[in-house]
Amino acid sequence: MKPIGYCLAMLLPLLCGGAVMAQQPAPVAVTVDVSHRLGPYKPIYAWFGYDEANYTTMRDGRKLLRELHDLAPVPVHIRTHHLLSSGDGVADLKWSSTNVYSEDAQGRPVYDFRILDSIFDEYRDAGVVPMFELGFTPKALASGSGEYADHYPGASTGGAVHSPPNDYAKWQAMIRQVVAHMVQRYGRATVAKWYFEVWNEPDISYWHGTPQQYFELYDRTVAGVRAALPEARVGGPATTGPGNPKAAKFLEDFLDHVGSTKVPMDFISFHVKGQPHIQDGQVTMGLAKELNDADKGFAIIARYPQFRKLPVILSEADPEGCAACSMKINPANAYRNGTLYPAYTAAAYKRLFELADHYGIDLISMLSWSFEFEGRDYFEGFRSLSTNGIDKPVLNFFRMAGLMQGSRVAAAANGAMGSGQIIADGVRGAPDIDAFATANGRGAAVMVWNYHDEDRPAPAASVTVTVRGLPPTAGRARLIHYRIDDTHSNAYTAWKAMGSPQKPTPEQLAALKAQEGLQLLESPRWLAVSKGTVTVTTDLPRQAISLLQLDWQAP
């Protein structure tokens, strides 16, 4: 099956619904048909990750984990790097450690689970589910020479921690022992629900070996996991974006290897990333790159009949690649503090579902590689969900997604761009004003956004949302209208209005806390339903998102 970017010209009217109208100015008409079901609403939003595993047990990390649990009615999965790395358990940017494995003078294994247990105990206590990334190489097993640890902002993936094991048999035995310990501590039924992912981005410098060495690592790791827990779910290869030909070849070669050896694989993972930059003095996003990565990756998987029905986990899906690179390092990362980040994520969200539908892919995760950075400046511009315990606007996108339930239903807008057009052109002319909707027998939820790659001032759009297909017995519908914009669900603009304090007073902290969570644009109200149809009109600013929740009752 050809990628959408390839077949754009032929399939544009069919696959890129509304794309030919993408240049139309406001007013924008959105039509939602709750009787036209597209497929199940899988909670692909309920996945998060971060480099610094040791932040898990720190004050703001513990708080945020509980917020993540509370945002979704389904299990929230957490993925972190460095769960097997050697060290003292002190977090640094792009570094963490557990010291779970070492060896005595005779080369015999020594296990110390105290740090690892503290991390997984925190997951358990917060009610979130680990996605156990099995990496990186303990110091006693590292084959690389030179400095062991990573040191950001230097060679942040340069340490021997990323080298292949010097003894694959010992690596396999270690994996078996670690998984067996997890089963003993947390229970077999619990651990059987986790996903075990082998390594991270082995196609680049996160792996200091050859592809063939990674394939052996994968085989040995699966054997170790399954020896301890035969029903465990194991997969990979967690490569970078397949829009890069090198990454695409690695993914293909990996699938060929698994297909030829018949080694178990329960899910397939790879990463998708955008590419923001500064253009004419303005932050300009790169949504086209992230969607192109997904398009190419899904197309590769679809070519393997034996694998195309496996769950696919985008184990990092983000606007760019370095969460720990603040806007002090890269000014384009200023997008992370305000509404541009959630608006971008909303625009990507619908298109990832569309692309998965097109290729017949079982997409179960769009993992946001974002968490928090303990003890750093307020709103320093890290890719994070909170800053010093204050929620950032992007976290409210995930809260909106968590309020959507049931089935995905048809939603079209005359201000929308389809996946193919965004892949080809980005969102550089007219804005992408579009909607994503779900419904069940009792109500519906419509997410509407006004997104543009360029972070420039623009007038708000007048958007009319018409929801059709309500039950004949529905006499009226209650509207609950949430909003993310400059004045709603936005602690960042409140912080700036205070003068951007780095040592907020107790009164200022209370005011920032008051801006956390989803905020209503208006008081809930009842709307008349006529012939199964209800209409809502709102002004939607640039880089803003509305969530319209509707529930109905008989007259």
Image: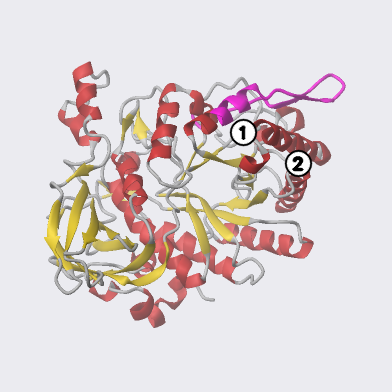
Residue type at mark 2?
Answer: Ala
The percent position of residue 504, horizontal first and vertical second, equals 24, 19
The percent position of residue 392, horizontal first and vertical second, equals 30, 37
Residue type at mark 1?
Answer: Leu
Indicate yes or no whether the magenta region holds residue 94.
yes
Of the two numbered discs 1 and 2 on the same chain, state the one appearing first in sequence.
1
Placement of the N terminus among the 4 image quadrants:
bottom right
Real-space CA distance between mark 1 and mark 2, rounded to the nearest whole angstrom: 18 Å
Left/right placement of residue 112 relative to residue 46 reads: right
Residue sticking out furthest to the right: 106
Task: State the residue at coordinates (81%, 20%).
Answer: 104
Left/right placement of residue 180 relative to residue 555 reads: right
Left/right placement of residue 110 relative to residue 280 reads: right
* Residue range of the region highlighted in magenta in the rendering: 92-121
In this view of the protein, which residue sits in the foreground, 197 or 524? 524
Placement of the C terminus among the 4 image quadrants:
bottom left
Q: Quadrant of residue 441?
A: bottom left
Q: Confirm whether residue 505 shows in the render.
A: no
Q: Which element carries disc 2, helix, strand or loop? A: helix
Residue sticking out furthest to the bottom: 10
The percent position of residue 433, horizontal first and vertical second, equals 24, 62
Q: Which residue carries the number 1 mark?
A: 83
Q: Residues within 10 Å of mark 1 (few under 14, many from 20)?
A: many
Q: Which residue carries the number 2 mark?
A: 228
